Amino acid sequence: MKRRAGTTAGVTLMEVMIAVTLLSLLTVGMAIAMRVGLNAYAKTDARLMVNRRVAGAQRVLEQELEGLMPLVLPCLGAGDAGGGQKFAMFQGEAQVMRLVSTFSLQQGWRGQPLLLELFVIPGADDRGVRLVVNELPYHPIAVGRMCTGFGQDVSDLGLTRFPPPQAGEGSFVLADKLAYCRFSYLQLSKADPTLPPVWLPMVAFQGWPQAVRVEMAPLEADPSSLQPISVTAPIRVHRAPEIPYGDY
């Protein structure tokens, strides 16, 4: 069709509608692509965070146990029942462990000694369990008052008694959504020290085990993510504080 003389070139309404429609489809396609990419990035980042958390918790457990300080303190919380008797500052049970360590979550190896309470509590909505830790300032008198006495019958094995730990706002969750979590301790037999050491669910004497094992299993196994595994850390006590040494 020939244009008349003196008229200017332009576009029809149909052409404008087609152009707007194509631009809208292009914008929607780009928005969908960006959303898919951001969702993939968020899922990858969340999975990496979970993996880093699991690996970090295992590393923290090992460092806390390796930083154990072998201390012998007077029992101050038992009153006259304690009789001024001293105890080894280590509580080793299947679900609770107390020790004084030179490693902390906030300050690493550069901080002051802290009293660590590692214990197992029920998980959210009572599904599974979680491993938490309390980091409390260490002071000999305050820690000595935590000793509430000594077991006298066979069931207590003559061990130091402590109050149960309590989870609070300052508690840090080391591992969550676990099917189980338990502690065991590598110990020599007091009756026959020549026998090889065995793993026991509690420390059967006042002192320190040769190693500590923290056994964990996920509540729901996910092969695509890093799973909590057992952590075994040696306890190195080169000089028993309860034995007086002569310096020559």
Image (tube, rainbow, N blue to C red):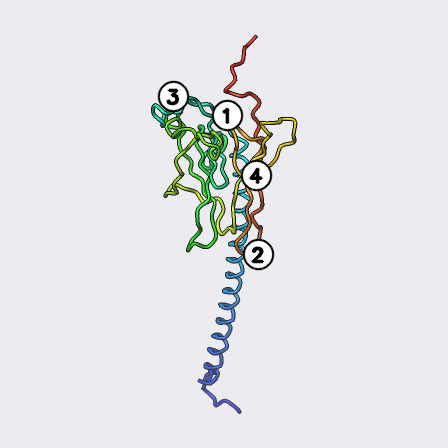
Taking depth in this image into account, of 62 and 24 the one nearest to the observer is: 62
Q: Mark 2 points at which residue?
A: 222
The Cα–Cα distance between marks 3 and 1, rounded to whole angstroms, is 22 Å
Q: Residue 70 carries which label?
A: 1
Between marks 4 and 2 in the image, the one whose residue lies nearer the viewer: 4
Q: Which of marks 4 and 1 is nearer the N terminus?
A: 1
Q: Is residue 243 above or below residue 109?
A: above
Amino acid type, residue under disc 3 in the picture? Gly
**Disc 2 marks which amino acid?**
Asp
Residue 37 in picture, x, y percent from top left: 53, 62
Nearest-to-viewer mark from 2 and 1: 1
In the rendered image, the vertical position of residue 90 relative to residue 231, given as above or below = above
Residue at far left of view: 79
| Residue visible at 54% across and 52% down in the picture | 218
Q: Which of marks 3 and 1 is in front?
A: 3
188 or 45: nearer the eye?
188
| Residue drawn at the location 60% of the way across and 56% of the way down | 223
* Residue position for label 4: 213
Mark 4 is surrounded, within 10 Å at the Cα level, by few (under 14), some (14 to 19) or many (20 or more) other residues, namely many
Mark earlier in primary sequence (2, 1): 1
Marks 3/2: CA–CA distance = 53 Å
**Does dot 1 land on a helix, a strand or a loop?**
loop
Structural crowding at the residue carrying mark 2, measured as other residues with C-alpha within 10 Å and reported as few (<14), some (14–19) or many (≥20): few
Judged by depth in the image, the label closer to the viewer, 3 or 4, is 3
Q: Where is residue 49 in the image (x, y as percent from the top left)?
A: 52, 50
Residue named by callout 3: 83
Farthest-out residue, top:
248
SS at circle 2: loop
